[in-house]
């Protein structure tokens, strides 16, 4: 049997952000209903936090089974600074296998770095759809890299963005970002903030997509009715804000307890599974109820869609079907 | 950057069982010394034990970093009965990614089903080398499938096989096996046993490579100085034998506690990490001492090399180097 090979360019030519937003929502529903299976990812530390090997990187193995597509797959994705950055390569490197879950034959191998960026944007945008009644919002961003761009693209599929406020440690990056995403914002209304604190004022949703290794956002900055999405691998807000937040919603409990925003408070024994209100999947599937932020006027919400292989595999499955239908991609007989 | 693609046939044309035995030994040493990193594999259950999805299969994600080769990779491998078996496909389906651990660029995608079979044979053969002084042995086998063949091939690299005794639930499989592996045994001396108990008598090493879902080998059968290798995904010997064995050696503690021979006694609370004497890596690296079975004349030993991604990735790394040197394989530009 031949296996379909898809480059990043080919894969992304077959899907739009609108598609990805729809797939991600359907997939959250499947996770809530139990027909999307997503084991906790396993990390290979290549020096991101471990002393050996000393390469300032990591790779995460993220397998999943998607019931509504009847496909299984795995994304192997990671990031590295150091030499990778020096070569001018993007932070994320990622590939994916898809198999027929019945015969285990390998259907496809594809690049999945841009899929990762797209679904990461879609995850928070879809979550926000279930957290607020508003469809016109002011949007705050920490970080002005590739993932900030896909956040904007995804939010713009569901919301009218009245304004974007953005902060990046490297101001020229924020300036380039402003030009690149102007088309997604009403009247190109984008404000570059010179200090982190200025971002949050008036925002409905605030997304942090940074490589920051210490907290940026402080407890006192975030106001009632605001939703904060810390998407980074490290903790982008203070322990205090996490512990004082009124509702915390995540995409995957096992993963969120061991990576990203919650890792530190969990390791300190200050936070555990019982402090998570519900999953995004439970909200989308209607298995758990959470009032819209407008109806919880005193509450502050943190939402952490840290990223699941299920979202990648589901997007990959749709790309695969379209590639076959259109005859796009290469092929190789591995066995 | 182009990624090298290797079919099963191409990959296996670049390596011999002798090579694999050498790589596996070197890799055990690396695991013992700490420069081979092997996180516990993560299982995607496709109906092997879970009710949903109902496909009688599984896939294991097995990432690793190999210090002595400076390569990182992941094998995604599984097995399925049902439709896969009906199609006449081998039980194991497996592919592997290799990356440069510094830049995270994907160097290769290759089939790894036969690599899995080869390294599985080599793992127990190399372990036996460190457990006995003998280099002439009588070898017992439960199961006469592909993995039984690679066990024989690997043991024959280290030992003179005076005799093989084999049992398979399906006698014609044992008869075909006898013909296929005759070349690896002194005078083609292979005895097909009609009942499981007959295998163990006089054997130095007994390897179980079956798909049995309940114990075959009983406590009373195994004698002092014998080494039993239960290699299956399920428990191939009774709880009683595991609990009465004098020394238990494994390849990977985390994995062995949660899959295969030890899973049941661990889940019953009768066995824990402290009951494992040491790892094969610790033996090979000289970090732990265990007298040869001849010098422990009253003791019975169980050795469980359940299989690590590190062994696959290390073999894949050597195959990759040779493929590049010889210009073998296809290529594809994924990104």
Image (spheres, coloured by chain):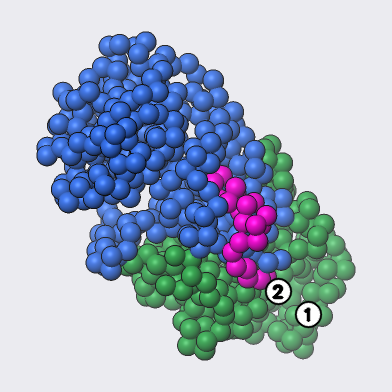
Chain colours: A green, B blue
Front one among A220 and A262? A262
Residue B315 falls inside the magenta stretch: yes
Over which residues does the magenta segment extend?
B314-335
Pointer 2 chain: A
Can residue A159 be seen at all in this image of the molecule?
no
Above or below, A51 against A7 in this view is above
Counting from the top left corner in percent of width and height, residue B94 is at 44, 57
Residue, x 39% and y 62% (percent of image)?
A37
Q: Is residue A267 above or below residue A170?
A: above
> For the N terminus of chain A, which image quadrant?
bottom left
Task: Tell me residue B28's x, y (percent).
Answer: 52, 33
Element type where label 1 sits in the image: helix
Locate the C terminus of chain A by quadrant: bottom left
Instruction: Output the chain of dot 1.
Output: A
Q: Is residue B181 visible?
A: yes
Q: Which residue is mark 2?
A: A149
Residue ranking furthest to the front: B187
Pick out the residue farthest to the right.
A172
Front position in the image: B71 or A193: B71
As drawn, is B245 to the left or to the right of A80? left
Q: Image quadrant of residue A17?
A: bottom right
Q: Which residue is mark 1?
A: A180
**Residue A168 point in image, percent of width and height:** 80, 63
Q: Earlier in the sequence, mark 2 or mark 1?
A: 2
Describe the element under mark 2 as helix, strand or loop: helix
Say which residue appears at 82% left-offset and 80% top-offset: A179
Front residue of A127/B322: it is B322
Rendered image: mark on residue B9: none
- Asked if labels 1 and 2 touch by Cβ distance under 8 angstroms, the answer is yes
Are callouts 2 and 1 both on one chain?
yes
């Amino acid at each position: 049997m031949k296996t379909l090979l898809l480059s990043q360019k080919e894969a992304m030519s077959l899907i739009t952000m609108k598609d990805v937003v729809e797939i991600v929502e359907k997939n959250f529903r499947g996770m809530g209903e139990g027909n999307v299976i997503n084991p906790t990812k396993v990390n290979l530390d290549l020096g991101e936090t471990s002393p050996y090997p000393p390469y300032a990187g990591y790779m995460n193995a993220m397998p999943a089974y998607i019931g509504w597509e009847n496909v299984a797959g795995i994304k192997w994705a990671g990031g590295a600074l150091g030499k990778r950055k020096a070569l001018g390569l993007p932070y994320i490197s990622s590939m994916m296998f898809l198999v027929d879950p019945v015969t285990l034959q390998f259907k496809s191998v594809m690049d999945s770095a841009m899929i990762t960026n797209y679904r990461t944007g879609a995850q928070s945008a879809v979550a926000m759809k279930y957290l607020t009644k508003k469809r016109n919002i002011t949007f705050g961003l920490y970080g002005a890299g590739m993932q900030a761009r896909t956040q904007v693209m995804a939010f713009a599929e569901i919301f009218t963005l009245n304004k974007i406020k953005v902060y990046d440690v490297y101001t020229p990056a924020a300036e380039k970002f402003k030009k690149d995403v102007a088309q997604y914002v009403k009247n190109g209304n984008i404000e570059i903030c010179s200090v982190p604190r200025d971002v949050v004022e008036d925002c409905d949703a605030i997304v942090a997509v940074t490589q920051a290794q210490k907290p940026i956002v402080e407890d006192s900055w975030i106001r009632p009715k605001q939703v904060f999405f810390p998407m980074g691998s490290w903790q982008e807000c203070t322990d205090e804000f996490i512990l004082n937040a009124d509702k915390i919603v995540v995409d995957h409990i096992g993963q969120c307890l061991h990576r990203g925003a919650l890792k530190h408070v969990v390791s300190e024994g200050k936070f555990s599974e019982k402090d998570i209100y519900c999953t995004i999947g439970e909200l989308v599937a209607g298995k758990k109820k959470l009032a819209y932020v407008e109806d919880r006027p005193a509450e502050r919400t943190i939402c952490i869609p840290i990223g699941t292989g299920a979202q990648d595999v589901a997007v990959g499955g749709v790309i695969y079907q379209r590639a076959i239908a259109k005859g796009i991609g290469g092929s190789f007989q591995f066995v």
